[in-house]
Each structure stands twice: as C-alpha cells, then as structure tokens.
Amino acid sequence: MCIRDSPSIFSATEGRQIGEVWFEGPDGQDLPLLVKYIFTSERLSIQVHPNDAQAMAKGLRRGKEEIWYILDCEPGAVLGIGLIRPMTTEAFRAAATDGSIEQLIDWKPVKPGDCYFIPAGTVHAIGAGITLVEIQQNADITYRLYDYGRPRALHLEDGAAVSHLAPYARDLIEAPLGTERQIIADTKAPFTLDLVHWHGEKSASLPDSKQMWFTPLSGAGTVNGEVWAKGDCLLLTGDCTIDVTTPASILLATPR
C-alpha cells in the first residue's frame, strides 16, 4: 500500500515506506480539517465513512467527508467511487464477503488535476500508482469493507449500515495546475476548497473565528515572513501577507 521512494518534496524518508504524509495542528488541537498527501503503489482497501450524526452516535465528534485532488498518476490508474448499480444491503454484504465487490465498484480512470468529492456513505477505494492531496474532516473513522485478502480487520456490519448502495452521482471536477476555480463550496461540503494560481504578493484577512489551510502544489514564497514551498501545508489565521517568489498553484480550504 505504500511507496518506498516518495516524491522529491518528501525526500527525507531514508528508504522507509511512506504511504501518507499528514499535517497536524499546533499543540494537539482538534482542528476541523486535516490535509494529507497519499502515495499508492498498491490498491488501498474498499471502505466507507459515516456522516456526522452516525459518528456522534458512536461517541465521536464528527464524521468524515473528503475530497481528492490528483497530483500525479501512472497510466491506467483508477479511483473506485460508488457502485455500478444499486444493491440491497444483503447483496452488498455477500459481495464484500466473497470478493465480488471488486467488480461492483465503479472504477474511474484519473489524470492530474482531477478532483472528486467523497461524501459520507460513499463506498470508495484508491487504486495503485496515484499521488493525491486529500482534504478531509478531521476524524479517524474508517469502516473497511474489503482488503484483497490482506490480514486486517474488516468492519462489514458497521460499514454496510452507513453505505449509500448506489452509483456515484456527482460530476468529475477538473482543475489542472495553473488554473483557478472553486472546487467545492461549503453549501455542498463541510468546507470550501479553491485552487488559485498566484504570481505576486497577496493579502488575506481572516476573521478571528476562521482558519484557512494553505497547501501549495507548486511554486514558493512566504507567509508573514515564513518560507513555504510545494509539499507544505500552513494553517492561516488573522491578517496574512502572502508573497509568491515563483508562480504558484495553491489549494485553499476553509471549514464551514
């Protein structure tokens, strides 16, 4: 599930296998969002996440919805998102048990710049040969439905209970590096996500109650004098002066 040689922006891995890099808040704060880089050399498990109400019923603070931004991928790389046809809960459990769920997942070919929002309840999987950025609700709750015979625990009953057993109905979002667009609004997700492409100095003023996750995908610069480059993630609050020393494509995420 991991790669041994991560991209050069994460080169200080000393030969270890690295499948994820994530960015935690200061002093162990329970922040609403989490940003990850994910690198796959094998297929990741088929899984699903609960929504806020379902997670809170289990004593957790929030559920988990996420969005994937494809940075790079090998030819033929795919994401599994939703099912190819509606199913009953009983048929879905049986398919997860006997492995035929692999043929029931909607495997979508991907290219750099593709984005998919994964609402809670969406059965999903990340295929091999992909580097992506994931912006998600900050919740460590995953129900693993199928794991290709690997010896890890499955959570079939809990997972089937929260799964939306139907095809994925959302359109692909295309946002190549160098372009600008709102990828998703907070009316459709627990956060807003924008891709911007900047060339010079910018300023941002965030209300005291607001936070912004600043994730540069290319370029370099400073924020309030702190140096950043691609592969970083900065949590911005208050008044910020952002200087771009080389043209930069940046993901900006703000919780609802």
Image (spheres, helix red, strand yellow):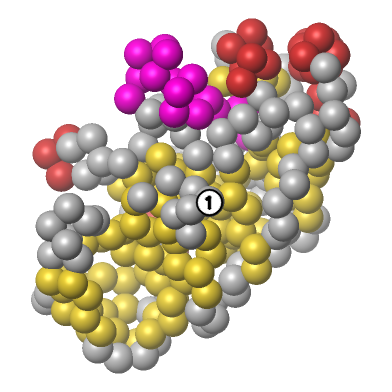
Q: Position of residue 91 (x, y in %)?
A: 85, 14
Front in this rendered view, residue 190 or 153: 190
Horizontal side of 211 relative to 94 (left or right) equals: left
Front in this rendered view, residue 132 or 52: 52
The image shows a total of numbered marks equal to 1
Q: Looking at the rendering, in which quadrant would you find the N terminus? A: top right
Residue at 26% from the left image edge and 41% from the top image edge? 31
Q: Which residue is mark 1?
A: 188
Dot 1 falls on a residue whose secondary structure is loop
Horizontal side of 5 relative to 13 (left or right) equals: right
The amino acid on which the numbered mark 1 sits, given as a three-letter code, is: Lys
Residue 89 seen in the current view: yes
Q: Position of residue 8 (x, y in %)?
A: 44, 63
Above or below, 153 relative to 38: above
Q: Quadrant of residue 148?
A: top right
Horizontal side of 40 relative to 169 (left or right) equals: left
Above or below, 20 relative to 202: above
Residue at 24% from the left image edge and 56% from the top image edge? 211
Q: Which residues are magenta?
A: 44-61
Q: Position of residue 71 (x, y in %)?
A: 56, 63
